[in-house]
Amino acid sequence: MKKELTCVVCPAGCRMTAEFDDTGKIISVTGNTCPRGKTYAESELTNPVRTLTSTVAAKSKDGCVMIPVKTSKPIPKGAMLEAMEIIRGLTVTAPVKVGDVISADFIEEGTNLIACKTVL
């Protein structure tokens, strides 16, 4: 079986083809112009991950504002809905600075939800 995908590691956007054996194991990856493409294809086809970006409500002196947040590293794609449910229930109190940890060990141990904007 073969699967085609486009590499997003760099701007080249290589069109790659991954070939699988009968057990679903990747036999080969072709079409990549650098080693990062092969690594990306293997990861994307076996355990796809994404960096999650969203907003969290923050209580400040100006009322309630939304602050942008993101995960400190990619999380499994299959955990996105669970992550958004958790984020929907979060509220923080100002002051919040860029880089502050909003939620430690978010979805996975070692992955934090961090603030991307300062709110005083």
Image: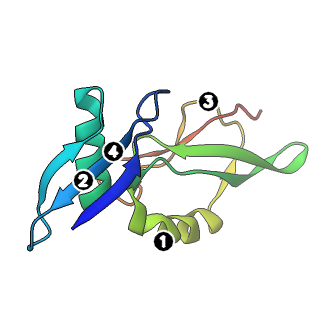
The circle drawn on residue 16 is 4
> CB atoms at circles 3 and 1 under 8 Å apart?
no
Among numbered discs 4 and 3, the one appearing first in the sequence: 4
Q: Residues within 10 Å of mark 2 (few under 14, many from 20)?
A: some
Spatial CA span between label 1 and label 2:
30 Å
- Could you tell whether 14 is left or right of 2 in the image? right
Spatial CA span between label 4 and label 3:
37 Å
Q: Residue 55 location, x and y as percent? A: 68, 52
Kindly identify which residue carries mark 3: 98
Q: Residue 48's quadrant in the figure?
A: bottom left
> CB atoms at circles 4 and 1 under 8 Å apart?
no
- Could you tell whether 72 is left or right of 1 in the image? right
Among numbered discs 4 and 1, the one appearing first in the sequence: 4
Determine whether the residue tagged by mark 4 lies in a helix, strand or loop.
strand
Given this view, does label 4 or label 1 mark the residue nearer the observer? 4
Q: Residues within 10 Å of mark 1 (few under 14, many from 20)?
A: few
Residue at (52% x, 51% y) in the render: 52
- What amino acid is found at the position of numbered circle 2 in the picture? Ala
Determine whether the residue tagged by mark 2 lies in a helix, strand or loop.
strand
Kindly identify which residue carries mark 2: 18
The circle drawn on residue 82 is 1
Among numbered discs 3 and 1, the one appearing first in the sequence: 1
